[in-house]
Amino acid sequence: MHTYSKTDPILWTGRKSGQQLYLHEKVICVDLNSEQVPITNGRSWAILGYACDEGVKRNEGRIGAALGPDAIRKQLAKLPNHLRKNTLVLDTGTVDCQDGDLKKTQTVLSRTVTQLLQQNAFPILLGGGHDIAYGHYNGIKRYLATEGINKSVGIINFDAHFDLRSNQTTNNSGTPFYQIAQECKLAQSKFRYMCLGIREDANNSSLYGTAKDLGVSYVDKTNFNLLHFNTIKDKIAQFAKEVDYIYTTIDLDGFSSAYAPGVSAASPMGFSPEIVLECFKIIIASKKMISFDIAEMNPTYDIDHQTAKLAASLVHFVIHQSQ
Ligand SMILES: N=CN[C@@H](CCC(=O)O)C(=O)O
Ligand SMILES: [Mn+2]
Ligand SMILES: [Mn+2]
């Protein structure tokens, strides 16, 4: 019954060039329980899996997201490497939820995120249900607190859903941002949350009410496309101006199921990848992004690895665009 495990390097395979032309030849697997994160004078990207679908199960979704991190790793492995020599891509293992203890899993995830940030690595988390966000955000907050940095963290979520369900009965994949909002209230700090791609046919009126009460900024799916990019761009730039750091999270179920069938709650009317890449350019240019994750990858429902390939391409884009 393990909660953290290192990655078997066998997952990182692909065409062999012998000169790091592919990411599988660039990636270094690190066991955080027994090894130090390697040091570089360049950037360090730290991939961390969240193999957990307990939150999805509790939220009455289709389970299978526990297999998400390895499915993304396998596709990422095959992609070309255009990174600088002194840029490190580390695979720092996976946190799992085999015993169904979601709270413990989120705590271990959060501590691991803190550890990575303390070692100057930029976390890239691969899920797993969207309950990944609660552990991820708290890991960032703990890092800032332990470093004595009194700065604000804004959340940008690409998603069809607000994920602002009340956690009164249980914590699940639909409650992470409500939980964060409650904790912000307790700490008397402003809850800074922006959602891009919200679908009216995927959120009930009570969720819209909660979003309004909590001052959530959002772009409806019908306006989340390149035709409206100037407005979206200004909105993101304004949000970025008002926070010190940005935690970015992508829920794959925000994409149209034409691009991302491999999720728990598929979105036939979801958004397309191009708009997400354009938004990422703005977020990266702000130089405020502190951490990033991709949630809800569910290989059980994937078709021809399309969703895993999309997730891998998003990671590839972020690490290359940030050079
Ligand atoms: N993380 C996903 N959350 C969605 C799932 C919606 C659904 O199952 O249809 C939510 O709770 O709203
Ligand atoms: Mn969603
Ligand atoms: Mn979500």
Image (cartoon, grey):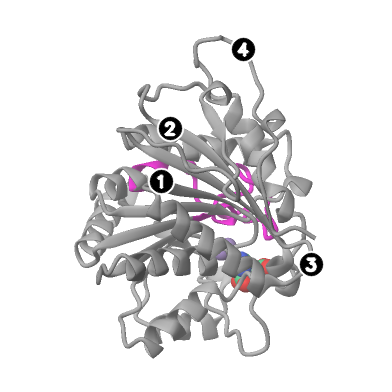
First of labels 2, 4 by sequence position: 4
Q: Main secondary structure of the magenta part?
A: loop
Q: Which residue is mark 4?
A: 16
* The quarter of the displayed image where residue 41 is located: top left
Q: Which residue is mark 2?
A: 88
Please state, as top left, top right, bottom left or bottom right, where the C terminus lies in the image: top left
Q: Amino acid at mark 2?
A: Leu
Depth order, front residue of 231/47: 47
First of labels 3, 1 by sequence position: 3
* The quarter of the displayed image where residue 248 is located: bottom left
For the point 48% across and 58% down, the residue is 113
Callout 3 touching callout 4 (CB < 8 Å):
no
Q: Which residue is mark 3?
A: 99
Depth order, front residue of 63/121: 121
Of circles 1 and 4, the one toward us is 1
Q: Count neighbours of disc 3 (C-alpha within 10 A) and say few if under 14, some if 14 to 19, many if 20 or more.
A: few
Side of 244 relative to 301 (left or right):
left
Side of 200 relative to 242 (left or right):
right
Mark 1 vs mark 4, CA separation in Å: 27 Å
For the point 41% across and 63% down, the residue is 140
Residue 132 screen position, x and y as percent:
57, 62
The segment highlighted magenta reads 250-279
